[in-house]
Image (spheres, rainbow, N blue to C red):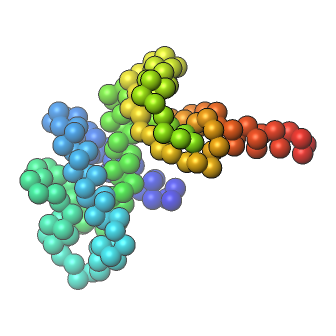
């Protein structure tokens, strides 16, 4: 996985630079996301490794409808370099670069039960204050947390779940 990220990084930076220069962050993000989803399908991934698949066919398969000429050239470069299978990593790295440029933190809040809108607003406000940036939150429910929530904001994970507290207590008692 780390090798794939290392290989994908220069392509993600190139895509980011093109999108920044064109002022088309959302369009490039959507196109990369589409292409990454298609390339990530196991049936398509096997096809992409087939040497009989032509470069034009690969681009046609992976490019979303109405993709810009620049995006299609980007896919052609990936095909020529035999890097089409890296599209999921390229898309993820592009999203990180875009979020940094737009000063947005993406966070996932996983709770034991569905959060009320007021509770989610409090969490978003606290995260904005902590990071000094806008925050985009996605939510998930995991009943195994028993209670509380886990907030994953990239490099920062805040575990306020009952399950996490019990695990920490168990570890402290064991040592």
Residue placed farthest to the bottom in the image? 52
* Residue 31 position within the rendered picture, expressed as x and y whole percent measured from the top left: 21, 51
For residue 137, what is the image quadrant?
Answer: top left
57 vs 32, left or right, is: left
Res. 157 visible in picture: no
Is 121 situated above or below 28?
above
* Residue 54 position within the rendered picture, expressed as x and y whole percent measured from the top left: 18, 76
Comparing 173 with 58, the one in front is: 173
**How many tags in the picture?**
0
112 vs 171, left or right, is: left
Which residue corresponds to the image point at 28% horizontal and 64% vertical from the top-left?
38
Which residue corresponds to the image point at 22% horizontal and 39% vertical from the top-left?
26
Is 156 situated above or below 44?
above
Is 119 situated above or below 175?
above
* Residue 24 position within the rendered picture, expressed as x and y whole percent measured from the top left: 17, 37
Which residue corresponds to the image point at 12% horizontal and 53% vertical from the top-left?
67
For residue 20, what is the image quadrant?
Answer: top left
Is 103 situated above or below 33?
above
* Residue 124 position within the rendered picture, expressed as x and y whole percent measured from the top left: 45, 25
Res. 119 visible in picture: yes
Which residue corresponds to the image point at 37% horizontal and 72% vertical from the top-left?
42
Comparing 116 with 43, the one in front is: 116
Comparing 101 with 172, the one in front is: 172
Q: In which quarter of the image is the C terminus?
A: top right
């Amino acid at each position: 996985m780390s090798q794939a990220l290392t290989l994908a990084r220069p392509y993600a930076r190139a895509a980011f630079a093109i999108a920044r220069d064109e002022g088309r962050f959302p369009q490039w993000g959507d196109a990369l996301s589409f292409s990454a989803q298609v390339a990530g399908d196991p049936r398509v991934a096997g096809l992409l490794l087939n040497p009989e698949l032509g470069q034009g066919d690969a681009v046609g398969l992976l490019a979303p409808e109405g993709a810009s000429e620049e995006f299609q050239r980007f896919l052609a470069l990936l095909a020529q370099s035999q890097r089409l299978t890296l599209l999921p990593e390229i898309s993820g790295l592009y999203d990180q670069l875009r979020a940094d440029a737009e000063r947005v933190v993406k966070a996932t809040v996983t709770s034991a039960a569905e959060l009320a809108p007021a509770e989610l607003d409090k969490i978003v406000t606290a995260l904005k204050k902590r990071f000094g940036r806008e925050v985009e939150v996605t939510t998930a429910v995991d009943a195994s947390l028993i209670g509380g929530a886990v907030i994953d904001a990239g490099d920062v994970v805040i575990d306020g779940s009952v399950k996490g507290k019990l695990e920490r207590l168990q570890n402290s008692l064991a040592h």
